[in-house]
Image (cartoon, rainbow, N blue to C red):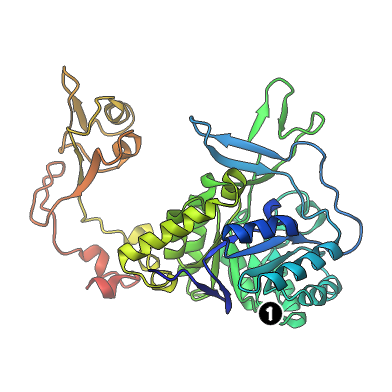
């Protein structure tokens, strides 16, 4: 059977599934339940320095976006970092690590952007025996208004500076958690590497307002008639997270920098996709908050079964395998031609493909009097819209035309040589393709 044991920054855990720094990792009770359920590691909810206490709202902290079946697609939260005493958290971390030495425990930290503040807290964390720290440079609400969280993560110079402090005053791995609320995520990742970071984790939550109550005219979640922007997470943010992960994985300046993937991981397949894009492990929050800690058991069994099927003996066998296939648009093969094909036996004659294509695309699907839908090859550009809107999985597929065939849309012969793609000097895949 596949071995899911993961070694990330020298930190071993029985599987690559870690709980992200969030409400599920706020106290000893939760973390013990998580480990008993099978999680390979946790990132303890963000600790702050001793000083004025953190005060959270005593009202709704979460807002949600649902699918048509009320499946939770996105979660917005306005909760701050831990509001429990620093010493209490430190004592609990030490106890849990002693009782679960085979599980990874990372401590998330967020203190003022002052060297002394970091110098004071790091020795306290080191005494707990935790395996490393994660610098929370991503939280977009509440703390960012105080000059922390995303306020630091949006300034590469600050990231580099604080990371250097942590590497100076702390002997174990330092992970820098990046904010997605930035134009180019490569810049903060490069800054983290310059500062000596051992890894980066991403993405933190996305700045958001999920809904407005049209009776009270207040954003949700609403506190006494007022609302605030919060952090958006869950399945809906996965595409954004994977794109940012891939940018760091293929950037020459950060290539080889270990990545912990975060953002909408709900199933084993999500995790495998993140790891194929270069992540050494994944962190999960919303899925656990939606389904409970035992959701990890399905992730473990699913990933193990898939690895067995593909012949992967360990996680490292497929980490980063998809990265060489991520390229810029200008290097895509423009000689590749595909056409949509409809499986008439699977078709339920709903007409969604026809409506979508006829009204909003290329008028490439015909409908007969008895509602038989067929692709008009001479009009089809293989945009994939029909595949995406079809409610029957695999009913519509895209089939590549073979070299030498004539494209009925353009009248051109499908070429075998992809000269405009494989020979481009800047194409990362040119050598392999040739």
Residue 139: name its quadrant.
Answer: bottom right
When the figure is inspected, residue 312 is found, relative to residue 265, above or below; the finding is: below
Q: Callout 1: few (<14), some (14-19), or many (20+) C-alpha neighbours within 10 Å? A: some
Q: Is residue 106 left or right of residue 237?
A: right
Q: State how many labels appear.
A: 1
Residue of label 1: 172
Percent coordinates x, y for residue 62 in the rendering: 69, 40
Image quadrant assignment for residue 343: top left
Indicate whether 99 appears above or below 363: below
Position of residue 361 measured from the top left corner of the image (x, y, whole percent): 30, 33
Q: Is residue 58 visible?
A: yes
Report the quarter where the C terminus lies. bottom left
Say above or below: 295 vs 228.
below
Label 1 element class: loop
**Residue found 80% across the figure and 63% down from its top:** 89
Q: Pick whichever, 181 or 118, lies toward us.
A: 118
Residue 104 spot, x, y in % from top left: 63, 70
Q: On the picture, is 235 further left or further right than 423?
A: right
Q: Quadrant of the N terminus?
A: bottom left
* Displayed quadrant of residue 387: top left
Residue lying furthest right: 52
Of the pair 94 and 349, the residue shown nearer to us: 94
Can see residue 273? Answer: no
Q: Residue 221's x, y, as percent? A: 71, 35
Q: Residue furthest top?
A: 369
Residue at 15% over, 44% down: 410
């Amino acid at each position: 059977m596949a071995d899911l044991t993961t070694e990330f920054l020298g930190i071993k855990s029985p599987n690559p599934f870690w709980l992200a720094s969030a409400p599920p990792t706020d106290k000893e009770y939760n973390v013990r339940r998580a480990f008993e359920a099978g999680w390979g590691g946790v990132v303890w909810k963000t600790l702050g320095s001793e000083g004025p206490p953190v005060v959270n709202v005593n009202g709704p902290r979460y807002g949600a976006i649902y699918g048509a079946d009320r499946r939770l697609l996105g979660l917005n939260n306005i909760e701050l970092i831990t509001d429990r005493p620093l010493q209490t958290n430190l004592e609990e971390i030490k106890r849990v690590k002693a009782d679960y030495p085979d599980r990874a425990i990372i401590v998330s930290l967020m203190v003022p952007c002052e060297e002394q503040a970091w110098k004071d807290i790091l020795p306290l964390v080191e005494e707990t025996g935790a395996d490393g720290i994660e610098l929370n440079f991503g939280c977009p609400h509440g703390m960012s208004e105080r000059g922390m969280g995303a306020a630091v993560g949006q300034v590469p110079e600050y990231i580099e500076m604080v990371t250097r402090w942590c590497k100076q005053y702390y002997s174990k791995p330092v992970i820098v958690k990046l904010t997605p609320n930035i134009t180019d995520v490569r810049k903060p990742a490069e800054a983290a590497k310059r500062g000596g970071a051992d890894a980066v984790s991403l993405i933190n939550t996305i700045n958001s307002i999920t809904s407005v109550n049209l009776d009270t005219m207040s954003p949700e979640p609403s506190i006494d008639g007022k609302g605030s922007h919060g952090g958006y997470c869950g399945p809906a943010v996965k595409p954004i997270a994977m794109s940012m992960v891939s940018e760091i994985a293929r950037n020459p300046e950060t290539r080889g920098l270990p990545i912990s993937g975060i953002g909408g991981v709900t199933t084993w397949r999500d995790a495998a996709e993140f790891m194929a894009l270069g992540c050494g492990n994944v962190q999960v929050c919303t899925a656990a908050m939606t389904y409970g800690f035992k959701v990890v058991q399905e992730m473990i069994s699913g990933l193990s079964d898939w690895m067995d099927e593909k012949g992967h003996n360990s996680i490292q066998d497929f980490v980063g395998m998809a990265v060489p296939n991520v390229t810029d648009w200008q290097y895509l093969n423009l000689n590749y031609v595909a056409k949509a094909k409809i499986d008439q036996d699977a078709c339920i004659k709903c007409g969604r493909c026809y409506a979508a294509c006829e009204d909003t695309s290329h008028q490439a699907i015909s409908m007969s009097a008895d509602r038989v839908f067929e692709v008009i090859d001479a009009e089809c550009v293989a945009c994939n819209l029909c595949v995406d809107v079809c409610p029957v999985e695999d009913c519509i597929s895209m089939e590549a035309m073979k070299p030498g065939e004539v494209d009925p849309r353009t009248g051109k012969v499908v070429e075998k040589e992809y000269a405009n793609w494989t020979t481009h000097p800047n194409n990362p895949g040119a050598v392999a393709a040739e």
